[in-house]
Amino acid sequence: MTETNLFEDEVLWWSAAAKGQAEALAKKLDPKTKLVRKDKSPLWRFVAWFLFLVSFGYAKRERMYEWMAVTIGRRVYIPSTWTLGEAIAVLPHEVLGHVAQYKRYGLGIHWLGIVPFLVIYFLVPFPILWAYGRAYLEAEAVKADWDYRADYIGAEHLSMELLRIDVNSWVSRIRGKGYAFALLSKTAAKDIFWSAAVTHITRKVGAWHVDA
């Protein structure tokens, strides 16, 4: 473990010693992105209630403050309990994935994409068990994350086995309570994540041959 990794694992992302690094990466990925502490955001209190309601009580509000990073428009809400390393790890997914999606649905303006994104994410075609919109948006963000990793560390360092583990992990997560039981069918979840993530990465690195 390098000194940099040790620092990232021990220092809270919003502390004076670390916040600049997290914000620098966010701005590099999208200059308009803003990082926000969840526990300091009045908006997030409303969002936590909304998630609680649309998930029929499965998305507990208390856990939402400490559990996951969530993006709304160009703002990425990160738990105050996370270290710098944890924050940096999710930024490609949140910024290159979700911030970009808000921008696309808003025709280039992040805040205009909030309503279309949330409708697709939570209601298309149904809030739970058949929430294909949520699954597709998350799969696209996973694809963006792997794209960034390929550019950042180099395709020659990527492992097909690591990709399989990552995608299979997402198949499990998207069907669990963290994502409000988005999909009932494991087969459908696997199809979405393999087609969105693996197909894209296969084209990017060129040399991979995928047998999902």
Image: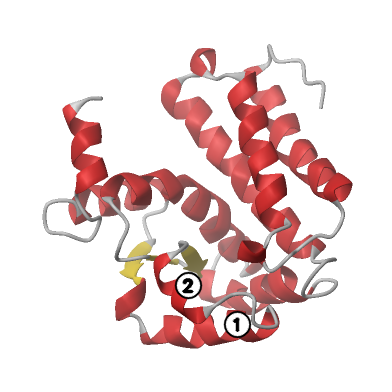
Most foreground residue, 41 or 96: 41
What residue do we see at 54% from left, 41% from top?
145
| Helix, strand or loop for disc 1 | helix
Above or below residue 62? Residue 196 is: above
Label 1 – label 2 distance at C-alpha: 9 Å
Most foreground residue, 56 or 48: 56
Outermost residue on the left side: it is: 16
What residue do we see at 61% from left, 72% from top?
113
Above or below residue 112? Residue 133 is: above
Residues under numbered marks 1 and 2 in contact, where contact means CB atoms less than 8 Å apart = yes
130 left or right of 65 in image: right
Above or below residue 187? Residue 165 is: above
Residue 35 place in picture, x, y as percent: 34, 64
Q: Which residue is mark 1?
A: 52
| Residue type at tag 2 | Met
Dividing the picture into quadrants, the one containing residue 146 is: top right
Q: Which residue is mark 2?
A: 64
Whichever of callouts 1 and 2 sits on the residue coming sooner in the sequence is 1
